[in-house]
Amino acid sequence: MTLQMTSNIESLLGDKAEALLGFNSPKISKDRLHLPGPDFVDRVFMQSDRNNRVLGNLAWMYNTGRLAGTGYLSILPVDQGIEHSGGASFAKNPDYFDPENIIKLAIEGGCNAVASTFGVLGMMSRKYAHKIPFLVKINHNELLTYPNSFEQILFGTIDQAYDMGAAAIGATIYFGSDDSHREIVEIAEAFAHAHELGMATVLWCYTRNPAFKKDKDYHVSADLTGQANHIGVTIEADIIKQKLPENNGGFLALNTGDSSYGKLDKRMYSDLASDHPIDLCRYQVANCYMGRAGLINSGGASGENDFAEAAVTAVINKRAGGQGLISGRKAFQRPMADGVRILNTIQDVYLDESITVA
């Protein structure tokens, strides 16, 4: 079975297979990392200040779905009805206007948890909250304000999430934005209250500032996203969601000419990372307390090569020492059977023992 899975994954990787599967010289050794495994909650979180209820909900998430007992996570996120608007998100498959179909996709797709809004999960909580871990997204950027702005605002309370039986809450912070200070304080308080009530915490760690776009889009640079991760784990996010890095040198680009921004050490680029995508992702893992908080990367938008792109992202994340993928649009913007297939393709990467941490 493993040979068959590996063959399928290699075919999806195409001409990237050798570079991704053969890479074994990361700048930061895997020996420094706290890697995923069946004992991850006991080995890592039992040493922390998380209470027994948080440990129980983390264990429930890590022991649900096809990846149960591996230490890896496959999460279906569907909050795009708010973040990207309902019509734009569900035009390809309007079945997902119905909250029950979102949850059914997560269950049939073998996911560890389903992440969505207060409204979606609350509408179906009595039927499903005991069948799959609910990850309630508590804040959003809505796109009906004119002109569009980018500001994360709360859509409900931590007590609401607790009352519907949620295993975890999730939130987004736009690091680098004009609104980031309020968001950091607000979400730090929300995470503390969630932990008190026994829920785990997941942070969407996004960078956002027009100045981050220069010769490249440094919103997806390893150094800027890595620092966002580091702030995220500082406010006690148990799991970090981050976009896969596509470049590096955001701090360098923002410290040219008369511009001064943040702090950097050039060894960040020579000793801690190379240009290899697994190395760039490894730097993100390092900033999650060397893997003590799990890094899950985004699946990204749906396009023409979704299966191949999903496999590439999963291989990079796994070989970097990450804990999985949180992939939504690639799964729900197609017929449900195909959505299940793409979720299973992602999970196959983490189930394949021949694909190891670099």
Image (cartoon, grey):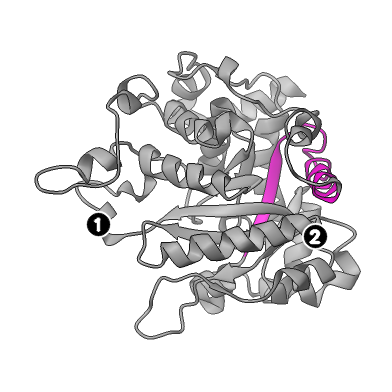
Which residue is label 2 attached to? 197
**Image position, residue 15 (x, y; %):** 43, 27
Name the quadrant of the C terminus.
Answer: top right
Establish if 257 lies above or below 14: below
> Is any part of residue 35 visible from this angle?
yes
> Is any part of residue 168 visible from this angle?
no
Establish if 20 lies above or below 111: above
Q: Amino acid at mark 2?
A: Leu
Residue plotted at (78% across, 41% down): 62
User: Which residue is nearer to you in this view: 295 or 235?
Assistant: 235
Establish if 75 lies above or below 180: above
**Image position, residue 93 (x, y; %):** 62, 70
SS type, badge 1:
helix
Query: For mark 1, does the 10 Å Cα neighbourhood hold few (<14), some (14 to 19), or many (20 or more) residues?
Result: few
> Which region is colored magenta?
53-78
Which residue is label 1 attached to? 211
**Left or right, residue 88 beside residue 137:** left
